Image (cartoon, helix red, strand yellow):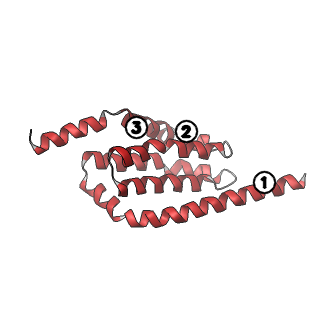
Amino acid sequence: MNKQEKREQQLRRLQDSKVYHAMESLERYMDRYYLDAIIGFIPGWGDAFSLLCATPFIYFSARVIKSVPLTLAVINNALRDILLGLIPFFVGDIIDAFHRSNARNMAMVRGFVEGDETVIRQVNQRAWQAAAVLGLLLALIALMIWLLVSFGQYLISLF
């Protein structure tokens, strides 16, 4: 078996996996049918569900493909999606409809699985940037949660 045949066999194996099909389904329902934005209208729970939907992408990139840069980029997209979704008064949910983090994650995963040199090069170039952004996004998410809780307590104190 030559190198090209091995590559094609590995590609078929990855594309036939249950996790890969789950990611395709998540992308379709959450982004193409705007379920991510609709679920985001449920305060608190919608964003938690969005983060849960990123789990197959993180698992696939970290455990199946075993690419640290891809995993960092996928986590970066997921956290950015959560941060945008936390913007109050449904503004975040409207922005979330256009951000489409699941579609972005699926495009990166497909690029790695199919060996798209452009996608691989872009993700590798952004690996360090993604690590720095992850720290910043985690801090911003913590700040946003604190602000929302404080604002909620203020509103409750008015009554």
- Label 3 element class: helix
Say whether marks 3 and 2 touch (CB < 8 Å). Answer: no
Coordinates of residue 153 in the picture (x, y in percent): 81, 55
- Point out the tag, 3 or 2, that comes first from the N-terminus: 3
Q: Which residue is mark 2?
A: 35
The vertical placement of 73 against 38, above or below, is below
For this view, does 18 lie left or right of residue 134? left
At a point 9% along the width and 38% down the height, the residue shown is 1
Q: Which of the two residues, 17 or 156, is positioned nearer the viewer here?
A: 17
At a point 67% along the width and 56% down the height, the residue shown is 145
- Point out the tag, 1 or 2, that comes first from the N-terminus: 2
Q: Which residue is mark 3?
A: 24
Q: Residue furthest left?
A: 2
Q: Which residue is mark 1?
A: 152
Category of crowding for the residue at label 1, using alpha-carbon neighbours closer than 10 angstroms: few (below 14), some (14–19), many (at least 20)? few
Coordinates of residue 157 in the picture (x, y in percent): 88, 55
The vertical placement of 71 against 126, above or below, is above
